[in-house]
Image (tube, rainbow, N blue to C red):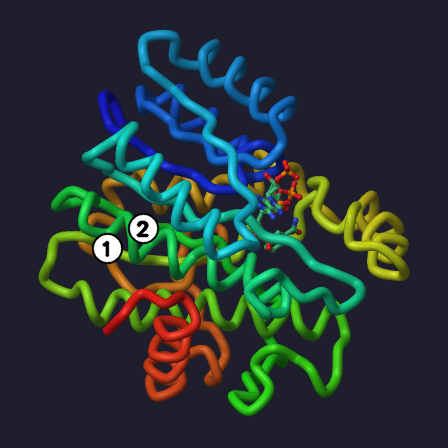
Amino acid sequence: MQGKTVVITGATSGIGEVAAVALARQGARILAVGRDSKRAESTLAKLRAANPDAQHAAPLADLSRLAEMKRISAEITRLAPEIDVLVNNAGALFNTRQVTEDGLEKTFALNHMSYFVVTGLLLPHIKRGGRIVSTASDAHRGARLDFDDLQCERRYSGFSVYGKSKLCNILFTRELARRIQGSGVSANCLHPGFVATRFGDQSGGLVSVAVRLVKPVGAISPEEGAKTIVHLAASPEVEGESGGYYYKCKPATPTPEAQNDADAKRLWDISTRLAGLGA
Ligand SMILES: NC(=O)c1ccc[n+]([C@@H]2O[C@H](COP(=O)([O-])OP(=O)(O)OC[C@H]3O[C@@H](n4cnc5c(N)ncnc54)[C@H](OP(=O)(O)O)[C@@H]3O)[C@@H](O)[C@H]2O)c1
């Protein structure tokens, strides 16, 4: 990764931060997208310690807002006109339904639309041989998309809506890989495992209680959880592989719903319209 430029969202905590530091240690320059200036400063200090020679940066954005997704993408391309790896990783689970200023349900906005918009705007800047890695989840198992209620207005359950957003991540990767086939850029996604991060701490209500109770029992460390991100971002083993879903650094099979090409295309078209990104 010597001399390569890596953009990572959700890089100020959990598996995103661990992956960012690991890739910096391998020689990469990291643009660590965060939203909190204190946490971003702390991440930046770790990146500088891991690779003092690179011009790391930690630009801030609230990735649940379309205007911020667009603004940060423009800022990133100013900082790095050529990108080697983009890791879409920022995500959260919300116990109660919230609506963003764009009229989007917040889980869908942050977990899916930020991947979609940031990737779309950075794609022209990703070099041949570059990689797009998206953090999805096995939480997609059991999820089905209801295209008549993508914003979950009829029924809202935090876990179920989160699962749908992670299904969106896999469908997005599938359609993206199809669209960029032959361009020299690859797109893969992954399940990191159940990881003891800050994830769920701010979800609120029963979700935070449940996550707090089960984390000490079953969760792996952020170092372990970040391994598949680092593998997909940097390993020569996956050179040329695209459109896959990975777990523990190996290809895994997502649900039939996550392999539905018609749904993947439909989600892409709707997301394009919602993002106001044109054709
Ligand atoms: N932990 C698990 O068991 C698990 C399992 C499967 C998949 N995942 C996925 O892994 C990814 C990373 O999660 P994690 O476990 O590392 O959790 P985490 O420690 O909570 O990290 C989440 C990251 O996303 C950022 N973020 C949240 N809301 C944001 C917003 N509105 N705008 C910009 N950034 C925002 C957070 O920023 P702050 O630092 O400011 O909070 C943080 O950097 C997520 O996509 C999650 O769905 C996690």
Residue at 56% x, 54% y is: 64
| Residue 210: quadrant of the picture | bottom right
Q: Position of residue 58 (x, y in %)?
A: 47, 26
Question: As drawn, is 15 to the left or to the right of 133?
Answer: right
Give the mark nearest the N terminus, 1 or 2: 2
Give the residue at mark 1: 186
Q: Position of residue 187 (x, y in %)?
A: 29, 57
Q: Is mark 2 within 8 Å of ligand 1?
A: no
Residue at 75% x, 84% y is: 155
Residue at 47% x, 25% y is: 21
In depth, the one of 39 and 72 nearer the eye is 72
Amino acid at dot 2: Ile
Q: Are marks 1 and 2 in contact (CB under 8 Å)?
A: yes
In depth, the one of 220 and 62 nearer the eye is 62
Q: Which mark is residue 255?
A: none
- Locate the C terminus by quadrant: bottom left
Mark 1 burial class by Cα count in 10 Å: few <14, some 14-19, many 20+: many
Question: As drawn, is 120 to the left or to the right of 42?
Answer: left
Amino acid at dot 1: Ser
Residue at 48% x, 40% y is: 227
Give the residue at mark 2: 132
Q: Position of residue 209 (x, y in %)?
A: 90, 54
Q: Position of residue 117 (x, y in %)?
A: 38, 58
Question: As drawn, is 87 to the left or to the right of 187?
Answer: right
Q: Secondary structure at mark 2?
A: strand
Q: Is residue 85 above or below residue 52?
A: below
| Residue 25: quadrant of the picture | top left
